[in-house]
Amino acid sequence: MSSSKTETEFAELLTRIDREVQLSPGTSYRSIGVKWYGEGAYVFQEKLGREFQASRFELRKDDVVYNDMWARRGSAAIVPAELDGCVCSAHFPTFEIRCDRVLPAYFRYYFRTPKFWEKCEDLATGSTGRNAVTPKRFLTITIPLPPVPEQQRIVAWLDCLDARVSAARALCSELRKDAAALIASLHLNLAGKRRMKLSEIFELHEIEESVSPTGSYPQVGIRGFGGGLFQKNAVAGTDTTYRSFHRLCPDAIVLSQVKGWEGAIAVAGPALDGWFASPEYRTFRCRPEAALPNYIRALLPTPWFIEKLQGLSRGQGARRQRTRPEQFLALEMPMPTCSQQETALAVFAKIRRAQESLPDEADLAALLPSALAQVFGG
């Protein structure tokens, strides 16, 4: 989408406005925050006027507002209709838009571009963690500005693209959830009343390799919620305090002790043969008389199985207990026979092929940023 655009300073398009609110002690006020990277404004907290320690300023629909302490991270937004009448602190400079020159929605999309974030980063001053962008500096930022009719066409195009991408991502997410639910349902139907402890299905199998100062050890990481294993950079023997790593082999079941409760468990594929995991990752293998690796590979990422893992440890956040091998192996669950698993694998293969036909999440996520780069440059 090409258009004739000139770089125009915010100072020509925005007017600083301070609508100080006379806070009533017994009245409740919604105070806003502004997300990073142009992700919009939101209600940060709601409390009575007497609970505020400093002045508050009113926001109105289509105002530009930014967080002066986090502008370097793209913390700027257009106030949406649902936040009209909210308040903000003095750390959120506010501006009225000259709508005869620029559409609020055009600004909103610009705030989502790396080009804008980089300009804010260049303007940040102060010590680390306190790099405030003053209103005076903020107004020196420029924006590629075509005539208003062209802005209207651009905004309509971006709105359409954004809506379609969001709909596609939501649909793909639902289809993947349905696929996981189908796998779990088939598993339970095949197992019936047959239950086994995981110690009867898996066994701890760890191939320890001592760390040599001259060695290099390509590492794996593991994503939570069934996200699987991924490759990381190699660690030199001189750059680690670990005395040994666990070497992976095909079909190894890898469990993160730290994040096991959130589904950080997966089966290693052939490509990870010979790669290494830290001692915090415990490795198991299927007992051949009880489980087929490909069957387990399909079952482990399902919300049904992850929910079972969550019950193995207590605590919240960083205080969450580690998932120990003995806890993991003591878990009991329904389990079909190997013959039944073999039958199910044909269905799982069809489900996998259907999932592989879905658009890649990363590709969908890249569509709007690509379009924004086309419109605004960068």
Image: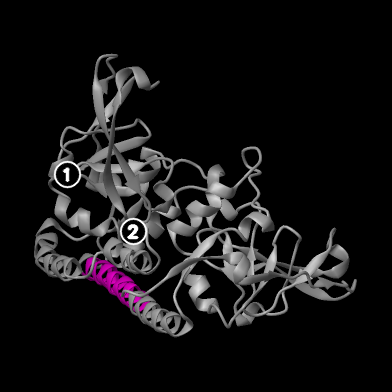
Q: Residue at x 89, y 74 (%)?
A: 24
Q: Which residue is mark 1?
A: 251
Q: Residue at x 78, y 73 (%)?
A: 29
Closer mark to the observer between disc 1 and disc 2? 1
User: Residue 312's spot in the image, x, y percent?
Assistant: 44, 49
Mark 2 surroundings: few (<14), some (14-19) or many (≥20) residues within 10 A: some
Q: Which residue is mark 2?
A: 305
Apparent side of residue 11 relative to residue 300 in the rendered image (left or right): right
Label 1 element class:
loop
- Magenta range is 166-189
Apparent side of residue 310 relative to residue 205 in the rendered image (left or right): right
Front one among 197 and 114:
114
Asked if the stretch drawn in magenta spans residue 187, the answer is yes
User: Residue 117's spot in the image, x, y percent?
Assistant: 50, 55
The relative height of residue 185 versus residue 36 in the rendered view (above or below) is below
The amino acid type, in three-letter code, at marker 1 is: Asp
